[in-house]
Image (cartoon, rainbow, N blue to C red):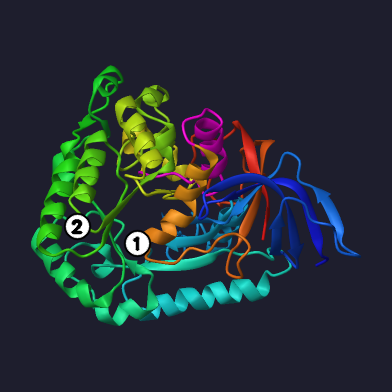
Amino acid sequence: MAIEVLQQVRVIDAVAGTDRTADVLLDDGMIQAIESQITPPEGSQTRSGQGLILGPGLVDLYSRSGEPGHEERETLDSFMAAAIAGGFTQVNVLPNTTPAIDNPATISWIREQVQARLLSSLSAMPTLPRLQFWGALTLETAGQQMVELGDLAPHVVGFADGKAITNLAMLRRMLEYLQPLQKPLMLWAYDPSLAGHGIAREGVNALKFGLPGIAVMAESAPLAAILELLQEIPVPVHFMRISTARGVELVQTAKAQGLPITASTTWLHLLLDTNDLGTYDPNLRLSPPLGNPSDRHALIQAVKSGIIDAIAVDHQAYTYEEKTVAFGEAPTGAIGLELAFPTLWHHLVEAGQLTAVELWRALSSQPLACLGKPNSALGTETSRWILFQPDYAWAVNGQTLKSRSLNTHYLNQTLQGRVVQVG
């Protein structure tokens, strides 16, 4: 690849916290220099960066792969292609596949598959994301029996079931076992018994639309209980899928008390709320459910202030047949790897609710921090970058999406903004 100077491009550095216009020198796709002005080296190419934004590659804390077990929903190929198309250069895969990622053999098999796809698809997909894997906490992520944590630890980025663990006695033992392993632990504070048969966040809109409600305490009660455990056994824990204003309050209080916790919410919980359920779109059947408008506002402010550390995609693919049912019968989840960044940019950054640095940080450096991983500034040897065109208009459909499934509320809509290059 030729040496290239990208001239006067907007550069976002999430680690340094800077947002400036500069020239960027690229050599074989690697950033060599970022300066106010760069004299192009002899024989190099130049390209205008007008209307483009360069920033660090995005990192998704948790998403689900269809393969192994549900290749009709998503294969490793389509999963990786969707990630790169959305600007995600690292994705951390949840363990609730079939079979579950609860033993080293399954990890080895998946890595062999990824390596095989890498070798066979270099011409078709020269840039691939880094896939890291969460190891299951319980066998088959069923919440009944602990896995051999020590055996799995060397092979995974951390431990999480991707499902709620309601057995607090077992969770207490897990915290004790995990102390010496020094691996991230990710938990979902959710109590299915308190959620009951609800399908929407309890409130005025749930009543208005005739949808059985899920009380806030289905999140706040288990969150409070886990925080009590951490008072006794202060193991670093990441709380995934925070979705309520009360959840934000509990996280804020725990952080103020010095508990070693981080937290994330998902992109859809920042963009949509119960006002959007009037269409009964089964692609908006999520777990946890979309919050009320006050919840969404609290989550946005929590991302801005750092109470919520990171934004996750929580990509979950389903086939057309699985999702084309009544709202209350639909499986929970939606795709989002290709959609999260442009929609968040358009609705939050361009609307003035978050700065460009705040959004980029919540999608890149902060997810790495939640994993206990070091961050590198743009231009270092380990850093990857993306080029984003915020005014790029594109239609969301089966021809433009790389994901194998189309279960998204944004299907057949026109979005503004797209990642046009990954380095």
Q: Secondary structure at mark 1?
A: loop
The magenta stretch is 332-354
Q: Secondary structure at mark 2?
A: loop
Q: Which of the two discs, 2 and 1, sits closer to the camera?
A: 2
Which residue is painted at 47% across and 43% down in the image?
358
Q: Relative to 13, is 30 above or below?
A: below
Q: Earlier in the sequence, mark 2 or mark 1?
A: 1
Where is residue 367, by image quadrant? bottom left
Few, some or many residues within 10 Å of mark 2 (<14, 14–19, 20+): many
Label 2 belongs to which residue? 165
The quadrant in which the N terminus is found is bottom right
Q: Quadrant of residue 5?
A: bottom right
> Residue at the spot x=67%, y=69% of the render?
121
Q: Is residue 200 shown to the viewer in this render?
A: yes
In the image, 258 versus 402, the foreground residue is 258
**Picture coordinates of residue 31, whole percent (x, y):** 69, 63
**Residue behind mark 1:** 96
Q: Residue furthest right?
A: 43
- Would residue 289 be found to the left or right of residue 30 on screen? left
- Is 112 located above or below residue 370 in the figure? below
Q: Amino acid at mark 2?
A: Ile
Image coordinates of residue 185 in percent, x first then y, are: 28, 64
- CA–CA distance between discs 2 and 1? 13 Å
**Residue 286 located left or right of residue 218:** right
How packed mark 1 is, by other alpha carbons closer than 10 Å (few <14, some 14-19, many 20 or more), is many
